[in-house]
Amino acid sequence: MRRNSLAWIVLLGMTVSGCAKDRDKDGYKGDDDCDDLNASVHPGADEVCDAIDNNCNGNVDEGLILEWYADKDDDGYGDLDTTVSACTQPSGYVDNSEDCDDTSDLFRPGAIENDCEDPSDYNCDGSVGYEDADGDTYAACNDCDDSDASTYAPTLFYIDYDGDGFGSNFITQTACSQPDQHAENDTDCNDLDPAINPTAVEVCNDADDDCDGETDEAVATTYYEDADGDGYGNPSSTTDACSVPEGYAETDDDCDDVLAEVNPGAEEVCDDGLDNDCDEMAGTCELDAEASDVVFWGENAFDNAGMSTAGGGDLNGDGFDDIVVGAKHDSSAASQAGAAYVIYGRSAAEFAAATEETDGVMSLGDADVKLTGEAEADKAGRMVAIIPDVNDDDNADLLVASPSADPSGNGSGTVYLMFGGGTSGSLADADLIIDGAVGFNYTGLGLDGGDLVEAGGGGDVLIGAPGNDVGGANTGTIWIVEGTVNPGEISVSSLTNYVTGQSNDDGIGDSFDVLDVNGDGQDDLVVGAPDSSEGGTNAGAVFVVHGPISGAVSLADADVQYTGESASDQFGFSLTTAGDTNDDGYHDWIAGAPFDDAGSPDAGAAYVVMGGLDLVDGKVDELALAKLVGESAADQFGIGVAGGGDVNKDDNGDFIVTAPYTGGTVDYGSAYVFYGPLSGTISGADHDARMDGDTLGDNLGNNVSFVGDVDGTGDGAFIVGAPFKDTIGEDGGGAYLMLDLGL
């Protein structure tokens, strides 16, 4: 019975358990549902903030209740010590506890601390304005981040109205980070135009595009005032503009902005005192012979004044070089006895004053010294020369030749030496008279002086006698009178030092010069032999004989021989020193070949030949530094040559070559000036200046000479002879003196 009761109890329990119900129909029955009357409460429900254990886990609103902090000063930051727990934010509370003083909205994170003397921690960072927590020497109130030593002072920013990245100082703001529409610089010179700022490219628009303080620099063009309206500007008066302003020019090369006729495009007018073409030198121009600085006329018809000219030495010791002009047919002493006129140098003003009343003309009758031939038909003055001092009185000395005189037979010739310029009178009173050896020697057709026999032994006198036969029939001879010279009268036959031609009929003696060709300090002799046929019949030749010269020397033994380019050229017809034209330390020379055919038949030529140590024999056209070529047939360009003077004052030696037969059958004659240095082949048409005769048969250029510093301004003066000029009477002749070819 007892066992049955236990079974009954079990059965009853099973019956009761199996009978539990889900009253709220939420899928949970009995004890599993903590509120079987609320379908939103059951173990699978989501907990919501409603003070109910929605998920039946024994906790109410777990995970949904938040801590809120009182924000009494309504600054968005809460008080750590005043809190409330709630599922949603209560009024007057915030979700942070970062306020360090909830009684004032001045205290909050991010507040500005700009008073370094105020001890309040307004920004709640644990430090006050005057502290320097990061040790960067900036107080906290001035430190953009006082916890980071690399971030410190706030930056001054400048308003950038035009947004080009460059600001202006109209408005500034100090901040730890760059505010909008601000820049870190104030370098914008126009903050209303984004195209104008320091990185902009300057354009020509009358604005300072790149803010460097200059307008249109490097893009604007500099223009130059053109006061005289000649199209060339004044370099000292400028303006910058984008186009040429009125009254301005694009160039700055006008050397005279007052005279419109003076500018770089003008044609140079020689010797008018103006630098017409602004090149600071005399330019290519045509010279008016009659407008020369001084024009010398012979005294009478048929005098042939200007048959010879010379200069380059101071005869009277006054500091000016002097001039001598020969008139071989002067008849004042006897018919065609001849004469030589000495004109002493003086300043240009004194030359002008002396000829003021005659418009630049001086009669040779007014010369300082007149020396006349001894006898009829002597033709004194056929050759003249001023040579270095031969009597040790420190003055240059004068040679006058009468090659037709008859001391030893017809045409044996006589040469007269005057110490200094002598005094007016007969050549019979010369300090030394040197007579030719035999008839038809024509002693004196060549004259020169130098230190040739013995270096330092005093000046020697050189006399050419082209008809002399000492070396062979008509070989010609150059006699040397050794210095120091004593007064008296001698015959060349007594002389022991002389040079003879290479071959019969060479006829040397009328063209030679003394110069130091090889730079050894000893003068050398350069001799022209226009009738030499070594390079072809009458091709001509020039010989160099190195000094010292002692005894009889034949040109067959010359140190160097240059032969003419072609037969009949007569190279060596004229010859003179050219100075050091190529600036190599050696004296050069120029020689004429008046019958050269390169320009036209007998147009003529002249060669500039270098001195030096290693000179070799050869044809002159292969060895010359320059060849100057005549313009027209039969001009005979090269009859006269001159070199070494500086006519245009540029410190370079210049050259003059004459052609006395220019003008076709007119024979008015011309003198061509070429500015040195020269090289290559140059046509006479490419001259730098040219002086022409103006009358039929003038034969201007029969001879030409540089005459040294006759006016105290330099060595550019030259004189050109015109022995057949008819101004004072038929064939009265004359000579033209140009002091220089300055501006």
Image (cartoon, rainbow, N blue to C red):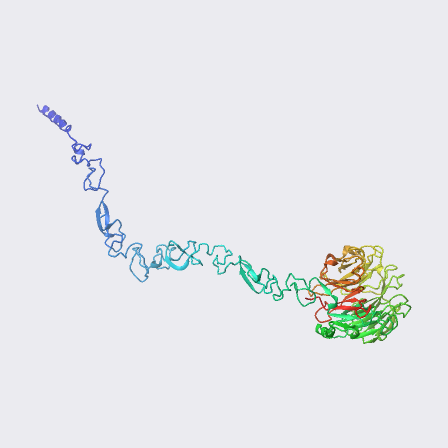
Which quadrant does the N terminus fall into?
Answer: top left
Comparing 605 with 551, the one in front is: 605
Quadrant of the rendered image containing residue 455:
bottom right
User: Where is residue 206 shown, x and y percent of the image?
Assistant: 50, 58
| Residue at the image point whose x is 37% and y is 58% from the top | 173
Comparing 652 with 196, the one in front is: 196
Quadrant of the rendered image containing residue 38:
top left
Which quadrant does the C terminus fall into?
Answer: bottom right
Residue at the left extreme, as displayed:
1
Comparing 143 with 261, the one in front is: 261
Residue 523 visible in the snapshot: no
User: Where is residue 711 shown, x and y percent of the image?
Assistant: 72, 71
Task: Establish if 275 lies above or below 5.
Answer: below
Q: Is residue 540 left or right of residue 582?
A: right
Quadrant of the rendered image containing residue 735:
bottom right
Residue at the right extreme, as displayed:
409
User: Where is residue 424 shown, x and y percent of the image?
Assistant: 81, 76
Q: Is residue 26 left or right of residue 453?
A: left
Residue 322 visible in the snapshot: yes
Give the total of numbered labels.
0
Task: Establish if 372 lies above or below 528.
Answer: below
User: Where is residue 319 shown, x and y percent of the image?
Assistant: 73, 73
